[in-house]
Amino acid sequence: MTVLPDWVQVLGALLTPMIAIGVAVIGFFQWHTNENKRKQELFDRRFDFYKRALSAYEEFHSERIGTTEAWEFEYFYIEAGFIFGDDIVEHLRNVSQNPKRDLAWFARPFEKYMRLK
């Protein structure tokens, strides 16, 4: 039977934990990348919704009201419930109560959702 030098035995003993640490580091970076991608995709969906809702809000306060289906905010309630909180759904329900066209008022509740945290 051949006896291996001590340094070979030590390296052999450390190989498994080193591989495990390497796999854990790779797994962490994959998770971090996927988390950033998820946040970016959610932001894109929210921003697209915001642009469509803003367009409908502007139509609601213009002479074009009723020329397209976009101005009817009822269509936005369901979608808003999936990608925003209840506060945005309530905000959209209150659009008709704001008699003047105020883009800052309309955009204010969306601000907290438009950040990539």
Image (tube, rainbow, N blue to C red):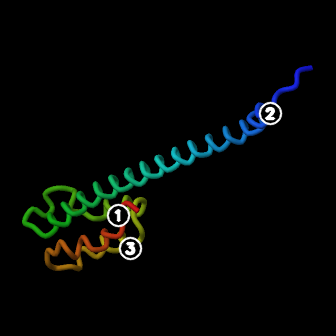
Q: Of tags 3 and 2, which is closer to the observer?
A: 2
Residue at figure coordinates x 36%, y 66% from the top left: 113
Left or right, 61 with respect to 18, comes to left
Residue type at numbered disc 1: Arg
Residue 81: x and y, percent?
A: 41, 63
Q: Give the secondary structure at mark 3.
A: helix
Give the number of the disc on residue 87: 3
Q: Give the secondary structure at mark 2.
A: helix
Q: Look at mark 2 in the image and give the residue it sits on.
A: 9
Residue type at numbered disc 2: Gln
Left or right, 107 with respect to 29, comes to left
- Seen from the viewer's position, the closer of residues 111 and 1 is 1
Residue 75: x and y, percent?
A: 31, 60
Give the number of the disc on residue 115: 1
Residue 106: x and y, percent?
A: 23, 72
Q: Of tags 1 and 3, which is closer to the observer?
A: 1
In which quadrant of the rendered image does the N terminus lie?
Answer: top right
Residue 115: x and y, percent?
A: 35, 63
Q: Residue furthest right?
A: 1
Disc 2 and disc 1: Cα gap in Å? 52 Å
Q: Of tags 2 and 1, which is closer to the observer?
A: 2
Whether the residues at callouts 2 and 1 have beta carbons within 8 Å, the answer is no
- Seen from the viewer's position, the closer of residues 4 and 26 is 4
Residue at figure coordinates x 15%, y 61% from the top left: 66
Q: Is residue 95 above or below residue 73?
A: below
Sequence-first disc among 3 and 2: 2
* Quadrant in the picture for residue 15: top right
